[in-house]
Image (cartoon, rainbow, N blue to C red):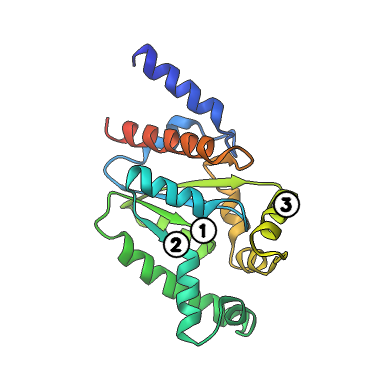
């Protein structure tokens, strides 16, 4: 490793807060070799997931799979918006329908791709399915934004506070996914800084997997 490479690695370590001190940066990279790297981008409402995903796609060309869009599609098939679909469907039935449809859809969308970004993944069952596929290497990035800032963004965006979507996400397992995050990004920083840090992480994982 050259001095420049070592310095870059230290820079990346300083830019992220690891959720667990039991997992080293290198161990996070070991299972990436010759696998489809699936970046799972998670966060609560108004944390900047969609903006970051679109910026990554624009910069790196990595295809995006939107889990929120999958929920919208499933609700639309029933003539409902996603909130009505969730709250008017018995919990066990909703989970079974949503997880089954999501798994089928995501498996198709990620097929034959070297690298994919799943934006707003919320179902712990879908994550477990992806993890259990030996062809996949899952890396979870959590965008951490305090509730008061997310509230401010929601009001600025649509003039009201809507916690229903977060309740939906927690219901299907988002909190469990966040606990498994490999990297935590400070969502209070400028979008350009967040993008730079995220891309540094992604490129480092890819570089190590190709060695």
Lateral position of residue 139 relative to residue 155, left or right: left
Residue 162: image quadrant is bottom right
Q: Position of residue 139 (x, y in %)?
A: 45, 46
* Residue 73, horizontal then vertical, whole percent: 45, 76
Q: Residues within 10 Å of mark 3 (few under 14, many from 20)?
A: few
Quarter of the image that includes the N terminus? top left
**Image position of 35 with respect to 130: above or below:** above
Which residue occupies 30% across, 47% down?
Answer: 35
Give the alpha-carbon distance from disc 1 to disc 2, as whole Å. 6 Å
| 87 vs 134, nearest the viewer | 87
- Which mark is drawn over residue 120? 1
Q: Are marks 1 and 2 in contact (CB under 8 Å)?
A: yes
In the rendered structure, the answer to whether residue 43 lies left or right of residue 198 reads: right
Q: CA distance from mark 2 to mark 3?
A: 23 Å
Q: Are marks 2 and 3 in contact (CB under 8 Å)?
A: no
Work out whether mark 2 precedes mark 3 in sequence or the reverse, and give the earlier one.
2
- Read off the residue under disc 2: 66
Q: Helix or strand or loop: what does disc 2 sit on?
A: strand
Outermost residue on the left side: it is 112
Q: CA distance from mark 1 to mark 3?
A: 17 Å
Q: Earlier in the sequence, mark 1 or mark 2?
A: 2
Mark 1 is surrounded, within 10 Å at the Cα level, by few (under 14), some (14 to 19) or many (20 or more) other residues, namely many
> In the rendered image of this protein, does residue 138 appear above or below residue 197?
below
Could you say whether the residue bearing mark 3 is in a helix, strand or loop? helix
Q: Quadrant of residue 205?
A: top left
In the picture of the structure, the residue carrying the numbered disc 3 is: 147
Residue 54 disc label:
none
């Amino acid at each position: 490793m050259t001095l420049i490479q070592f310095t870059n690695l230290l820079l990346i370590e300083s830019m992220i807060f690891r959720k667990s001190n039991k997992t080293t940066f290198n161990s996070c990279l070991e299972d990436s070799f010759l696998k489809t790297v699936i970046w799972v981008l998670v966060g609560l409402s108004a944390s900047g997931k969609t903006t970051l995903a679109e910026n990554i796609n624009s910069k790196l060309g990595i295809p995006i799979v939107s889990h929120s869009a999958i929920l919208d599609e499933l609700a639309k098939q029933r003539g409902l918006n996603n909130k009505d679909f969730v709250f008017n469907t018995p919990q066990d039935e909703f989970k079974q329908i949503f997880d089954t449809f999501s798994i089928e859809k995501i498996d198709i969308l990620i097929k034959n791709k070297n690298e994919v970004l799943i934006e707003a993944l919320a179902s712990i069952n879908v994550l477990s399915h992806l993890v259990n596929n030996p062809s996949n290497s899952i890396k979870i990035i959590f965008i951490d934004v305090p509730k008061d800032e997310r509230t401010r963004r929601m009001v600025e965006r649509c003039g009201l506070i809507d916690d229903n979507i977060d309740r939906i996400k927690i219901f299907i397992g988002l909190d469990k996914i966040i606990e498994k995050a490999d990297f935590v990004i400070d969502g209070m920083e400028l979008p350009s800084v967040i993008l730079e840090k995220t891309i540094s992480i992604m490129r480092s994982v890819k570089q190590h997997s190709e060695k």
